[in-house]
Amino acid sequence: MRGLLVVNPVATTTTERVRDVLATALAADVTMETVLTKGPGHGVELGARAVELGVDVVITLGGDGTVNEITNGLLQNSPLQDGPALAVVPGGSTNVFARALGYSASPVEATGELLAALREGRSRRISLGRAEYGGEGRWFTFCFGIGLDARVVARAEERRRKGRRNSAGLFLRTAAGQVTRGTDRGAPSMALETTDAHSFPTGVGLPIEEADARVAAAGEAAGSVEERIALGIVCNTRPWTYLNSRPVLACPEASFDTGLDLLALRRVRLSSVLRTASQILADGRGPRGRNVVRRHDAATMRFLADHPLPLQMDGEYLGEYADVALTHHPQALRVIA
């Protein structure tokens, strides 16, 4: 088996020792090349290179941002029937994707679990979401956000660049500050349109345009629903994120085997945000109430904002855009899990 090990050397919990242990452990089962990422966007290049070289598996040691870049490199043109599989070893601060696949949060324990999966030939196909915005297209593995959620990610990234340690506490303090200052409070700022997926297959290996057309056609047949909202969180699986070891279930029914799920608020007020946050953390049933909009198993979503709003994808800030279209792609990526 041929493999490519992609290491993000600046990821929060990635160390040279962990990298060496992982490379040594894999050497017995995989003919491995190890490459260190050089900066933003390099992971996309490495994922595309893995497809060109015809390797069997790409293994990432880094955080969710590294996973997202490799995924976008692997699937640049379209989902592949016989392309490289993706395997992940957690090396970031939260590692939502790795843990959603069932891996331990510890890199050492996850390495042992990955080796067992490789030796047993265990893999599965999972769905992905794709976002089109500002003339660009990008895949996401577990979450997408527009509005307050993305603004918090942007502010937290700024604080990290100034030397703050990445942690659950940093995001909680940043979120509290954003809501208190009222940046996103007031009337609804965007229109939302969704169409149901009902977990239908689009086929693997179709060009992106054809797969998107099938998703849209099936969604139109199922009918669309429109709302006015102030913020949106889209989940492709659960959890949405973690508070240390505690999973945060914004969309409790979300799964790699169904369409996209949504949690949205019609208005952002301090009281409503606090109520929704407490419901997310309370009982696993998810947020509810007159201010809450939820969707399960959606094929498409479109956000049309009154003015450009911040976006985040898999925990990485993307910038501000006013028109964003999401599509669900079943069985788009093969993973070792």
Image (cartoon, rainbow, N blue to C red):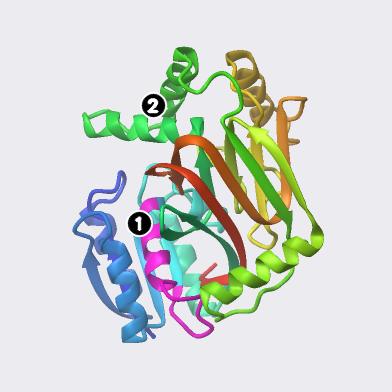
Q: Amino acid at mark 2?
A: Leu
Q: Amino acid at mark 1?
A: Thr
Residue 249 showing in the rendered view:
no
257 on left or right of 234: right
Q: Is residue 73 magenta?
A: yes
User: In the displayed structure, would residue 180 be above or below residue 158?
Assistant: above
Q: Tell me the residue that label 2 is attached to.
A: 170
Residue 185, numbered circle? none
At horizontal 59% and vertical 17% (from top left) the residue drawn is: 269
User: In the displayed structure, would residue 94 be above or below residue 276?
Assistant: below
- Which residues, given as a range, are shown in magenta? 65-85
Q: Tell me the residue that label 1 is attached to.
A: 66
Q: Residues within 10 Å of mark 2 (few under 14, many from 20)?
A: some
User: In the displayed structure, would residue 92 be above or below residue 126?
Assistant: above
Q: Position of residue 94 (x, y in %)?
A: 43, 43
At horizontal 79% and vertical 56% (from top left) the residue drawn is: 223
296 on left or right of 60: right
SS for callout 2: helix
Q: Nearer the viewer, residue 14 or 39?
A: 39
